Amino acid sequence: MRRGDLVAGAAYIGVAATVSQLAGPFWLFLLTSAVITAVVAVSVGVIYDNAGLLSLCQMTFAGIGAWTVGWLNLETNLPFLAMLPFAAVVPFTAGVLIGIPALRLRGQNLAVFTLVFSAAVARVLFADGFPGLIEGNRVHPPGFADSDSGYFLFCTVTLGLIAVAVTTLRRTRTGRWWFSVRRSERATAAMGRSVVVTKLSAFAVSAAIAGIGGALLLALNGIVSGASFQPIESMTILTSALMFGAGHFEGAVLAGLFGQLIPNFLSDVGLPRDIAPMLFAVGGVIALSRGEGGLSAALRAAGRRLSNLRRASRVEAPARAIQSLPSGHGPTTGTTTVLDIQKVSVSYGAVRALDDISLEVPEGGFFGLIGPNGAGKSTLVDALSGFLPSHQGRILLGGEDITALPPRKRALRGLRRTFQQGHTPRDLTVGGYLKLASADAGTSVAEALDWFSLPAAGTPIATLDVGSRRILEVCGALISHPRVALLDEPTAGLAGPDREMFVEALASVTSRMGVAVLLIEHDIEAVISLCDSVAVLDFGQLIAAGSPQEVLEDPRVVAAYLGAST
Amino acid sequence: MLTLVVAGLAAGGAYAIFGVSIVVLHRMAGVVNFSQAVVGAFGAYVAAIGVERGWGLLWAAVAGVALSSALSIAIGLLFARLFSEAGAAVRTAAMIAVTVGLFAAGFRFFGDAPRAVPVVLPGASVSIGGVVVTAGTVIVLMIAIATALGMGWVLSSTRVGVQVRAISERPVVAELLGVPLFARTALVWGFTGFVSATGMLVVASNLPGSFSSLGFLVFPAMAAALIGAFRRLTLAFVGGIGVGVVESVSSYRETWSEYRGAIPFLIAAAVLLWTQRHEVWDAAR
């Protein structure tokens, strides 16, 4: 743990301890409620800010946690601390179950589905009253915390522990994949990771956190009704989490504090309490219109600007100097075929995007794929990497038929790709991304950084320019030592000397590794210098194939590029 | 049993009206409108207050429908101004925030005690095969069918339909092509607000009508829209009717009716498990 984290933790406990001694019972109740709301806000942070999923059932999970503890309290004699883990485990399980039909949903569909789910639970499970409500069977906090100040401290410490756990989790592979899936599901699958498992883990973890929040709320009040766990409450907490930016801990705390204090403040100044959600709505809309991350992200950005101003000179980005490489031999192409493309056709309605394409990509070395815009190059890469819903023909990787395999399994068998748009997740560091991409095999991160003289492992991807992000994505595709790398316009966004150095480094790395590269490129010079053979697509047809010289002199290729009629 | 099916048609028709409106707005404006029912509830409540104050049924209804349409237009212009270039997730999140605000505003203005929404329709009924069908049910179904078919036609076959779809997908390009952004946005949102308020006025008189329970009609409506995958108007219509009928039939046995509230969810989950059985990738290449 870093020293700054320890200091922050000590300060947090110190403030909580001071407040617990100074505040009266009314304020302690209010602040404890705020801390509990912050716990649920942290769960929104995990699901929305980290994994990019819109969930409208976080208060439902809180309710399931509370329901579980209420039931255990009624049926068993367990102390609160022994019941608390169940408040996490049961919602966690519910999260997995509800996740299964929602697995492939994203964005609005997931939001709607979770909303309909929360309405169902509210009407079926919560409407009949919580266990212990009618009997008046109160849930008590643990004995050592059974006072206003004691329970406030207990909740504060629990919130702190959850925050530490979430922060730690974000730095593990599981947490990094959340950021990756948020940026792009395709890129995640292309790195060999199951999108479904990634989303499910985020959903279940956030459900567990919300469940603990529900149990804490139950012990604060002794008994609860379903009113606190209605769908509209889930929508409200999402709104305030959006406004304050619950992806950061301070944002979640602010969401909790303001969620409880604003209604109280309003009634103090003679305004109705219930206009508070209107204020959150306005705040949430404003926060969203200014980009994601809410108030906490804005505060952090302001903090960074301040510290940058203080620093006399900013650290210059290291000039991209690629170490000189043993020159004189280009990558050598083997004789065996590693990627065998047999009669692949793709149709969109009446349009034939790819027409009967057969290619044999040999082991090692570069195989160029060129053609004018709209020729079908990226469609072919999508077909090869498994992203098309359907196509005709067969694809063999090292002799194995992979036509029916999903993208993830193709990646695990050694077929990696990059994307034209660039899909590196901006919330990760360079090293974090490469660790995900390497799947703990292949080259070490430090060595891979050296290949293309990428910035240090700790550099946030958000600070890289477009060209560097693209190089990083190529590096990620190569770090796991794939058999075939499909590179979709890797030099786009790179200019002049940078481009030349990158091309040279790419040749050196892939040749040492023995990986076969299917290179889609508009930079014809790069294609000529790297590739032993080139195929040309035009309007979905393979119009030429052979050595770069032969192909470029082919009249049909010239016509395709210059637009002359044939 | 048949009586229950017919009884379910009234509620199902209401779900279908809101569900179809949600799909229409999604296709025309690219927004999932969580406030579809609550906007209608504003209109129904204003009409109810109008009747209490003796405005006369017609004027009260006109005032209510006008208010809902204006409210809907205001939301539409807000979105056109702030979120026209934002991604779907951001727009959805913003719509959730707006909906939370509208519910809070509704509580503030109207309280949450049930209020009798005036009966706009004559109490006439017809008997078909021994089962009584009220005029209300017939009219609700007709509004739902007319919206689904009419808007399906507008979207696919008219110039305005193409224009609004262009706005929802590429607002800047549409504007550069000379599509009147402001007028079309107002038209689309105003229309769905109008349909919601009309539908709400027709159905609210037979529902336990607290403001929030009217607004919560959006949950089964969302299930219907989800069944239509936010694209297919006819499927959304069928989904809404289906949810209403299954809900009603579930009260046939007491053990079933306990789970009545979960029916929209169960149907939506079943449909999703089927429609999403193949892997579908996110849009960006």
Image: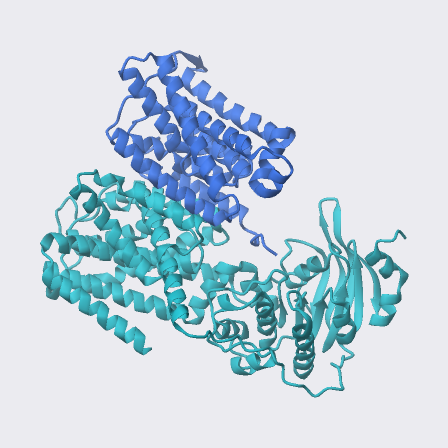
**Chain B, chosen colour in render:** blue
Determine which quarter of the picture holds residue A199. bottom left
Question: Quick one: B110 or B4, which is closer to the camera?
Answer: B110
Question: Quick one: A333 or B180, which is closer to the camera?
Answer: B180
Determine which quarter of the picture holds residue A552. bottom right
Left or right of A346? Residue B97 is: left
When the figure is inspected, residue B184 is found, relative to residue A318, above or below; the finding is: above
Counting from the top left corner in percent of width and height, residue A423 is at 56, 62
Left or right of B205? Residue B272 is: right
Counting from the top left corner in percent of width and height, residue A80 is at 17, 61
Q: Residue furthest bottom?
A: A326
Name the residue rendered at 35%, 62% in the picture.
A248
Name the residue rendered at 52%, 28% in the picture.
B187
Name the residue rendered at 38%, 30% in the picture.
B248
Could you say which chain is coloured cyan in the image?
A
Question: Quick one: A474 or A161, which is closer to the camera?
Answer: A474
